[in-house]
Amino acid sequence: TLSNVRGGLDGSSGSGPVIRSGPRSDSSSDSETNATARRSTTVDTVTTYMDDAPKVRQRADDRAIEISQAGGDVALGDAPHGAVIHTGGGDIRVGAASGVVDARTGGGRIEVGPVAGSVRASTGAGKVVVTLVDPAGAEQDVEIFTGSGDVEVRLPASLDARFEIETAYTRRDAPTHIDSTWELDHQPVTGWESHEGTPRRYVRALGSAGNGRGLIRIKAVNGNVTLRRGR
């Protein structure tokens, strides 16, 4: 149980839910069956119960939110100082954030943004949707992997980064493609290669925006990659 939450959050559960209670900045009330963090500003304490033994951690105001669980969905309303979220399997959703958001699931959809910072997202299978906004001059990096699924990324018009984009398709699936409103150098589709296991053909594209300070690296299997220009 989380109580008197007014800042960052660190919650962990081996299998059961992590439940937050206490004052909110809005008037809504809710009960979530998965690990959920709501808008807040310090966490006095975070208590999790494993084998009936409470474990208490302190979390500073300016630290990233950390959530780790064996499985289940994770929904995080916002992460003003970034977040590190790991689940053995399930969807991950993170709202408005700054800093770095690191979201990893053994399988499930990942949706992150808008983020005025950087994103790392990885899923064994599932669609990944990421939205970045202008970070006010800070460097932005994106690293995305999905073992099976589409990737959609919306990037700010002020983006200053290089592009390394790759999607592959196996024999039983339709050819994949890279669609971008940013100008990219599309490489020739490879022949059938098996250095990563199941034979697949690779579709790759490279490019750069601004001075290429950051890096947008995306790797997908049996899914299309779409890059869009935001504001």
Image (cartoon, rainbow, N blue to C red):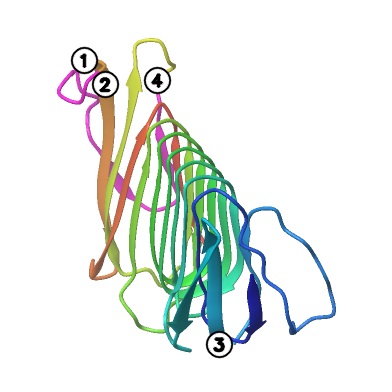
Residue type highlighted by circle 4: Pro
Left or right of 182, for residue 229: right
Q: Earlier in the sequence, mark 3 or mark 2?
A: 3
Query: What residue is pinned by disc 3?
Result: 44
Query: Helix or strand or loop: what does disc 1 sit on?
Result: loop
Residue type highlighted by circle 3: Asp
**Distance from the alpha carbon under mark 1 to that under mark 3:** 55 Å
**Distance from the alpha carbon under mark 1 to that under mark 4:** 12 Å
**Distance from the alpha carbon under mark 3 to that under mark 4:** 51 Å
Q: Going 79% across and 81% down the picture, which residue do you hit?
A: 26
Residue type highlighted by circle 2: Arg
Please provide percent x and percent y for residue 220: 36, 36
Q: Tell whether label 4 touches label 3 (CB within 8 Å).
A: no
Q: Going 26% across and 52% down the picture, which residue do you hit?
A: 207
Say above or below: 173 vs 130. Answer: above
Left or right of 185, for residue 134: right
**Distance from the alpha carbon under mark 3 to that under mark 2:** 51 Å
Q: Going 49% across and 51% down the picture, which residue do you hit?
A: 14
Q: Is label 3 or label 4 in front? A: 3
Q: Nearer the viewer, residue 206 or 39?
A: 39
Q: Quadrant of the C terminus?
A: bottom right
Tell me the crowding category of disc 2: few under 14, some 14 to 19, or many 20 or more residues within 10 angstroms, Cα based: many
Which region of the structure is painted magenta?
176-197
Query: What residue is pinned by disc 2?
Result: 201
Query: Helix or strand or loop: what does disc 3 sit on?
Result: strand
User: What label does residue 192 carry, if any?
Assistant: 1
Please provide percent x and percent y for residue 147: 38, 33
Q: Main secondary structure of the magenta part?
A: loop
Q: Quadrant of the N terminus?
A: bottom right
**Distance from the alpha carbon under mark 2 to that under mark 4:** 8 Å
Query: What residue is pinned by disc 4?
Result: 175
Query: Helix or strand or loop: what does disc 2 sit on?
Result: strand
